[in-house]
Amino acid sequence: MIFFSFFFFSLYRSEILIMTWTIDGITYPGNIKEKEAAKQQYEKAVSKGQTAGLVKASGRKTEKFTVSVNIAAGSKVTFELIYEELLKRQFGKYEMFIKVKPKQLVKDFEIEVNIFEPQGISELEAEGTFITNDLQNVIRKTFSHKKGHISFKPTLDQQRTCENCSQSLLDGDFIVKYDVERTTPDNLQIVNGYFVHFFAPMNLPKLPKNVIFIIDISGSMSGREIQQTREALLKILDDIKEDDHFNFILFGSDVHTWKETLIKATPENLDEARKFVRGIDTKGLTNLYGGMMKGIDMLNAAHEGNLVPKRSASIIIMLTDGQPNVGISNTQDIQTHVKKAIEGKYTLYNLGFGYGVDYNFLEKMALENKGLARRIYPDSDSALQLQGFYDEVSNPMLRDVELNYPENEIADVTKNSFKHFYDGSEIVVAGRLRDINQNSLTVDVKGEGANDALSFTSQQDKEQTAKAFQEQEYIFGDFIERLWAYLTIEQLLEKRISATGEEKDNLTAEALDLSLKYKFVTPLTSMVVTKPEEDENQAAIADKPTEGTAQAAPIVAQASPVHYVHASNPTWYTSVDGDPHFIISVPQKEDAICFNINENPGAVLRLINDPVTGITVNGELIGDKKVNNDAKIQNTYFGKLGIANKHLDLKVTVTPEKITIQNETGKTTFTWLDSVTVQQESLTLIINKKKSLVLSMGSGASFVIVLHQVWKKHPLHRDFLGLYTLESHKLSEQTHGLLGQFFHPIDFAILEIHPGSDPKKPDATMIFKNKELIVTRGWQKDYRRDPEHGIDIPCWFVHNNGAGLIDGVHTDYVVSSLF
């Protein structure tokens, strides 16, 4: 039997609330833990053959989660998953997508939806991507004032694809849409010292908009991608209003514009634009920086020359499928220049076409300029995806919206200023009152409209809120407090995307604390369900774990080729050696992932940073003695390593010539000609003459540093160092860095292995953190046991400086000095 019961409430979203398992008649609740602790508890139960479950966020946000299930042989298990969701309003309606994929005929299948809205329900719809004419009559819906009800209960025969077939028609999305009665532009609720404020004004005149479309026409966009882009742009031109201004900028190796300035969307200009769009073709490389700066300059000139209305919304929409490789190609430099040029005046939306883009870069750049990024998936409906995104931002009603609350009454408030408000959407702000007994709250709302400035004051008292919810007492409790916590966590994680160093660590810690306190599954936490400890002799042999991905719907998990592994097993290790080659061991798959980092000599890279144990490891690159002008990429190696423990005030500097230990008592220096063992309370150092050394600090991980010596008169090469990390499980969950981030559990799957450009090295698709990466099977050298010749380690090589594998981009890990 499958039965889905939903209670919709447009006030609130927090992802997972409760998961319980009933195992052989006994019910066990789920617990929210820091993700590594939850992972270890789950794996421990699985290793004993016990029934266990793990729910974790998939990716950097909180809309998608993964359920892993292990069922002990002979057990009967029922699991119930209850979650909460703040329904986001788009195109004038709240939408709920329910994934329906039973993959079999189900005797008792039912979806039941109950809706309660204190403002009253104005309209209610239900549809499904799999719904036939016959199934349409199975959907039952009713609503009256505050309450709505939907049910969908097909019989076995109604589920069949044909008479006497065993295949199910139920495969797709079941979608519920509704809206509420609106007599005022906003709605303010107060409960138990917390408030939530919904802002969705109606019937405002639309702001004229000024849109710059910046389109990548590099060679990689050829074929279906550029064809679908043309199709989407032609449909978008049909929707542009006559009061709008627009232009197209195309970038390949060079930058081209349709017109020299923004022009008005008259019928004649739109016809000319359609001819231009039909003629767009691909050519050259990817001068993304040139295209972006041309678009910003064009908007600046239009505003300075009064070519566009003063009261209008200016938007940049940029589409690319690759990475910048002409002009300024360093993504950090591009971000800096773009942010400085825009100066908060315009909103930037970045669309990444396919999987070859540096999506982290696009997302950071958009967030820094009050926009967002969206991935456009390469599929038959890519043109619809592009048009759908434009539809979301095509009708700005207000700009520079601020919702201000009395500072002396508010302790914490979520984001309360917004560049644009779009027709059919909704702004949600939540906060905490300084006085839990405060009875009322006043808000001042300001914004710029098409004709004049919008300004009004709204007030609500908690008695009104209590009265509104008296029909639904069970939901009255702490839901607004949890909503405030959820929005706060979501915004902390968003800020974390573009943060670095200490700021990123602080944001992480704050988001983790709130996630644990309010029991949310986030990218930092997981929910785990296991039976209490029992005699190991009673544990049954476990069936093979089944794993699946569920997106915002409590659907039975489906099989998926994703494996859950711990990359810090003490018998395996991570390393960086050679030019520099990074090897990430994945022990439970008996496999490895590798990547290179290409940076200039003199750059210092953050390899490991653990704010809990205080251990950091940085490495400084050196180059060959002479620059090879014919080579596209110059050889670099680690010529200096700095290992420190700030809690112990201890620093160790290693070069190919010497090893220096510095602490509060002074400096001690050794050379590689020494065979030395140093044993102190906080330090163990063992030098293996002219070969390697082993170093550990306090109770943290151990490091092996390998010395590579070349012929002193070699015309090019220099002596250099390799770093191997052992016992990385002794470092904390907060460890990061080019190596350190892989001390945490990592998931990946390999699909679609096919011949590559080298017959001996096949290519494949790697699924990692919900991204598809093109990888190549190859080998890297491990010199830990054989410093002279090394051992070939097979691995999946990730191209472009580990793009898509490492958090952010590789330049995020460049630091100013060794310590």
Image (cartoon, grey):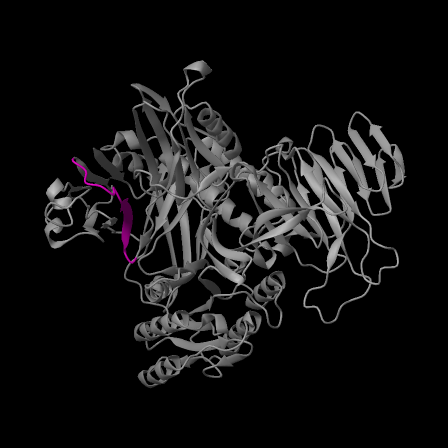
785, 139: nearer the viewer = 785
266, 29: nearer the viewer = 29
Q: Is residue 249 magenta?
A: no
Whether residue 398 can be seen here: yes
Where is residue 631 drawn, in percent x and y? 70, 68
Q: Quadrant of residue 341?
A: bottom right
Query: Which residue is pictured at 81% across the width and 65% down the height?
Result: 626
Where is residue 664 drawn, in percent x and y? 85, 33
Per the rendered image, the range of residues in magenta is: 91-107
**Left or right relative to 480: residue 568:** right
Q: Residue furthest front?
A: 760
Where is residue 304 drawn, in percent x and y? 52, 77
**Left or right relative to 365: residue 624:** right
Where is residue 104 drawn, in percent x and y? 22, 41
Q: Quadrant of residue 273?
A: bottom left
Q: Quadrant of residue 717?
A: bottom right
Q: Is residue 98 magenta?
A: yes
Whether residue 409 can be seen here: no
287, 193: nearer the viewer = 287
